[in-house]
Image: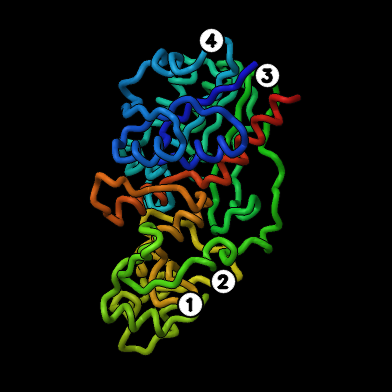
């Protein structure tokens, strides 16, 4: 039988792109954010539906599938409520987040659509929550075999980021699990991903690639990055360049902010602010600037040709960085796709 996939919370298509690279046929992507439509549709040639999952019916998803196909439903519900920062604020703060129960909306769609395969991807902390327990209970009640979900360390699959993600696979057909690691983590570095891009300065745009653009730096931040060494920290700076917060006891442990990356090491997690020098270890290993938008996308394992710039809309760096940082790494999507195909081939 043919296999078709619908991607919920699809964003700009990191998961969809990876599934397609694995050989799966993605037939629709759903997301609330209209600014994702151009990038998702243009790169993947898959219909994008701007929908709020709270207002959707299962029939809307069912209608995307052809008759007599193996249905696969995948999704990465927005993870902000379960991020490390949110967890530090306490359980009550988490539950007050409007995105808190989106995982249960995903469960509602699963009950209505009854796909053969389900994949859920999120931050590691979600596996320890009450809402995840409810999600797992729904899967079991609906007759799914599941691995219960596992925390994946991205370099084990060739993704050059110090990134951990929680991945769950479920199937109506029998036991299913993610394929074993494909890489030795010590061999995964940022070098092959971004070394060959043309050099640019802070605030500059590469003439041959409008995505290869770096944010401006203030005069003081330029002095700071020039004083930074790969893998070092603000401790390497002269006293006059240090931030006031770093002089307090509460700020002394934040050693990665204003840091430079190292060529022959993995990079930090690509967040929605990877283009900002002061928000993490996002300084280029050699050039005196933060990562460009293209570099962030490549470290998220998007293909070089992936286009994020809508020609009809002015470029806003923070919006594109948000799209990239929120995406499922393409390579992780590919691993989920390969795992799905191997399971169905049994």
| Chain-order first, disc 4 or disc 1 | 4
Instruction: Write down the residue under mark 3.
Output: 173
Gap between marks 4 and 2 measured at Cα: 50 Å
Which residue ends up furthest to the front in the rendered image? 208
The secondary element bearing badge 2 is classed as: loop
- Residue found at x 67% / y 34%: 177
Q: Position of residue 265 (x, y in %)?
A: 59, 68
Gap between marks 3 and 2 measured at Cα: 44 Å
- Residue found at x 38% / y 65%: 206
Say whether residue 255 is visible: no
Instruction: Write down the residue under mark 4.
Output: 67
| Chain-order first, disc 4 or disc 2 | 4
Gap between marks 3 and 1 measured at Cα: 51 Å
Tell me: 37 left or right of 18.
left
Identify the mark at residue 263; answer none if there is no mark: 2
Q: Residues within 10 Å of mark 4 (few under 14, many from 20)?
A: few
| Chain-order first, disc 3 or disc 1 | 3
- Residue found at x 51% / y 30%: 74
Q: Position of residue 328 (x, y in %)?
A: 49, 44
Whether pointer 2 and pointer 1 mark residues with C-beta atoms closer than 8 Å, the reply is: yes
Q: Position of residue 131 (x, y in %)?
A: 45, 32
Instruction: Write down the residue under mark 1.
Output: 286
Q: Tell us which disc is closer to us: 3 or 1.
A: 1
Q: Position of residue 146 (x, y in %)?
A: 63, 28
Q: Tell us which disc is closer to us: 4 or 2.
A: 4
């Amino acid at each position: 039988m043919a296999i078709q996939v619908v991607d919920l919370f699809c964003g700009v298509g990191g998961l969809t792109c990876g599934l397609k690279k694995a050989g799966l046929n993605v037939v629709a992507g759903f997301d609330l954010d209209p600014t994702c439509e151009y990038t998702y549709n243009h790169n993947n040639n898959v219909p994008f539906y701007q929908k709020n999952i709270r207002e959707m019916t299962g029939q809307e998803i069912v209608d995307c599938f052809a008759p007599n196909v193996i249905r696969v439903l995948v999704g990465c519900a927005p993870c902000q409520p379960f991020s490390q920062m949110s967890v530090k604020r306490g359980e009550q703060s988490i539950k007050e987040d409007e995105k808190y129960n989106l995982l249960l909306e995903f469960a509602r769609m699963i009950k209505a659509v009854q796909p053969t395969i389900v994949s859920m991807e999120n931050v590691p902390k979600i596996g320890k929550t009450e809402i995840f327990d409810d999600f797992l209970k729904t899967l079991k009640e609906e007759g799914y075999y599941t691995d219960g979900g596992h925390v994946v360390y991205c370099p084990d699959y060739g993704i050059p980021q110090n990134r951990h993600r929680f991945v769950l696979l479920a199937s109506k057909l029998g036991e299913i699990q993610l394929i074993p690691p494909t890489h030795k983590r010590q061999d995964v570095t940022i070098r092959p991903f971004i070394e060959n891009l043309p050099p640019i300065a802070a605030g500059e745009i590469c003439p041959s690639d409008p995505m290869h653009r770096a944010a401006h730096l203030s005069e003081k931040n330029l002095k700071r990055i020039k004083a930074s060494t790969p893998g070092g920290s603000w401790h390497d700076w002269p006293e006059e360049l240090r931030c006031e917060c770093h002089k307090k006891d509460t700020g002394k442990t934040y050693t990665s902010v204003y840091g430079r990356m190292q060529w022959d090491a993995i990079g930090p997690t690509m967040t929605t602010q990877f283009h900002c020098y002061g928000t993490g270890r996002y300084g280029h290993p050699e050039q005196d600037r933060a990562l460009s938008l293209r570099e962030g996308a490549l470290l998220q394992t998007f293909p070089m040709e992936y286009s994020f710039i809508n020609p009809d809309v002015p470029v806003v760096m923070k919006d594109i960085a948000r799209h990239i940082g929120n995406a499922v790494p393409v390579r992780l999507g590919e691993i989920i796709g390969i795992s799905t195909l191997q399971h169905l081939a049994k």
